[in-house]
Amino acid sequence: MISKNIKLLFCIPFVIIICYTVYLFTIYTSVPDIIPIHGYGGKNDGFGSKLFLFAPILLNLAILVFIWRIIRNPEKIKYSFEVKEEDLQKTHNTIQIVLVIIAIFVTIVMSLLSFSDVVYK
């Protein structure tokens, strides 16, 4: 059973993605048609269409779907430690909270990385 708090916290990454997507649509016309998509140390060695700006959104959504499937079925996790039957629900809740925190962190990092290379330069 997934608690309401877990479901509510798991909405945070989607709010971030929605805000990122809305902002991306508002500035989309001002972004050049060809953007750097790969580079290191200020030297770009890969270029592509500005449609690549939407790749992090799709990748992030795929990661969130994967994390949500684990959150929904924590009993399928094979722990590397022994869990007593009376502690099983507490362990599942802890795992779910950790996964939600990871989902939020991944979403924030992916959004910031997407903006830093293209939008802010």
Image (tube, grey):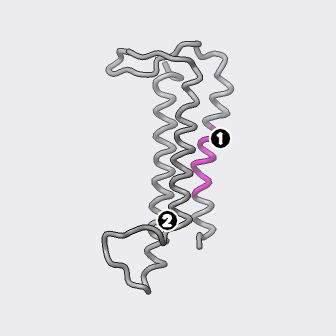
Quarter of the image where the N terminus is located: bottom right
Which of marks 1 and 2 precedes in the sequence? Answer: 1
**Camera-side residue: 77 or 97?**
77
Residues packed near mark 1 inside 10 Å, few (<14), some (14 to 19) or many (20 plus): few
| Kind of element beneath mark 2 | helix
Residue 11 lies in magenta, yes or no? Answer: yes
User: Could you tell me the amino acid type at mark 2?
Assistant: Gln
User: Could you tell me the amino acid type at mark 1?
Assistant: Ile
Residue 70 lies in magenta, yes or no? Answer: no
Q: In screen coordinates, is 75 left or right of 82?
A: right
Residue under the point 68% across and 25% down: 26
| Kind of element beneath mark 1 | helix
Where in the figure is residue 105, as x and y percent of width and height? 46, 48
Residue under the point 44% across and 86% down: 86
Where in the figure is residue 98, as x and y percent of width and height? 45, 61
**Camera-side residue: 73 or 120?**
73
The single residue placed furthest to the bottom in the displayed view is 86
The magenta region covers: 10-19
Q: In screen coordinates, is 110 left or right of 58?
A: left
Residue under the point 37% across and 20% down: 39
Q: Which of marks 2 and 1 is in front?
A: 2
> Looking at the magenta stretch, what is its main secondary structure?
helix
Where in the figure is residue 82, as x and y percent of width and height? 32, 78
Spatial distance from mark 2 to mark 1, Cα to Cα? 23 Å
The residue pinned by badge 1 equals: 18
The residue pinned by badge 2 equals: 96
**Camera-side residue: 77 or 11?**
77
